[in-house]
Amino acid sequence: MKIIFAGTPAFAEVALQGLHAAGFQVPLVLTQPDRPAGRGMKLQASPVKQFALDHGMAVAQPRSLRLDGKYPEDAAAARDAMETAGADAMVVAAYGLILPQWVLDAPRLGCLNIHASLLPRWRGAAPIHRAIEAGDADTGVTIMQMDAGLDTGDMLLTERLSIGPEDTTASLHDRLAALGGRLIVEALELAACGGLRPVPQPAEGVTYAHKIEKSEAAIDWRLPALVTERRVRAFDPFPGASCTLDGESVKVWAARAEGGGDSAPGTVLAVADDGIRVQTGDGVLVLTRLQRPGGKRLAVADFLRGFALEPGQVLGGPSAPYVSG
């Protein structure tokens, strides 16, 4: 079976690796154009592009796939490349471009998407982050037959995965990527023998995983400790939860929620090698791993050797009153 693959980040690279290892022919790979990255802001190829080139796969990087859009020449070139590839199906994983109807209709078996949630929960751009932030006990991967909607297509395969109490977006991402890589191989093997059974998504339980914004990084000490603890895990590695200590922005990479406390939100209650205890709107947040600008992530005992902090100090954060619910 010939497969066109469309994807960009590391999550998608894992799926492409799985398809390659399983022996599927991949005559064409679509990925986002190279982007500036790193301190030197040099153009950098996506993980998918790097893998594809290393394994002799043809790569196309259209800026758009809309024939009537801003870059019709890119879309036309991509259409020609897809026709030349003569693929049976297209696999899409975190590609980053909207697929117009002509793309969805092009392969004989259509376009199959690897989505990192149990649809219809967490449709959209950031399903891993939002599942952790919401306190979900589990998530999973859905292999979906793509249609014109936003993650609304029929479900082809699903598998559940538990979210651990210490899972971050980084750790959960890696487990879901591996699961997605395995499930897409299973789905294509079933498709080859006519064994896939599409199931429409239920109308109940739809939620949207909106894109993560940098503005969400600032810790709001008026929120309950448990909510902020989940946000710390959800925003690792991006954008990283942060607060200000003596006017300096500090990233918080690990924390745990505890009960108690009746001081003003943001007040440092205790400073010890096992954690900095900070009052929140409901409970206490114990900060256990932090990072100063330009520094490394440090356990709190190491962090405190270079940063003086005393009980009674107030950590910076939003100042408007927090209204629950």
Image (spheres, rainbow, N blue to C red):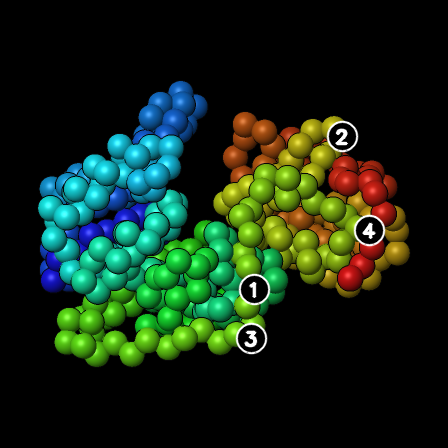
The residue singled out by tag 3 in the image is 204
Residue lying furthest top in this view? Answer: 40
The mark that comes first in sequence, 4 or 2, is 2
Compared with 152, 304 (above or below) is: above
Location of residue 81 in the rendering, given as x and y in whole percent from the top left corner: 16, 42
Location of residue 301 in the rendering, given as x and y in whole percent from the top left corner: 63, 43
- In-front residue for pair 298/16: 16
The residue singled out by tag 1 in the image is 207
- Left or right of 118: which side holds 186? left
Q: Nearer the viewer, mark 1 or mark 4?
A: 1
Category of crowding for the residue at label 2, using alpha-carbon neighbours closer than 10 angstroms: few (below 14), some (14–19), many (at least 20): some
Category of crowding for the residue at label 1, using alpha-carbon neighbours closer than 10 angstroms: few (below 14), some (14–19), many (at least 20): some
The mark that comes first in sequence, 3 or 2, is 3
As drawn, the label of residue 322 is: 4
Gap between marks 4 and 2 measured at Cα: 23 Å
- In-front residue for pair 138/29: 29
Q: Residue at x 34, y 50 (%)?
A: 100
Q: Residue at x 18, y 62 (%)?
A: 108
Amino acid at pointer 3: Glu
Give the quadrant of residue 306: top right
- In-front residue for pair 150/24: 150
Amino acid at pointer 2: Asp
Location of residue 200 in the rendering, given as x and y in whole percent from the top left corner: 41, 75
As drawn, the label of residue 246 is: 2
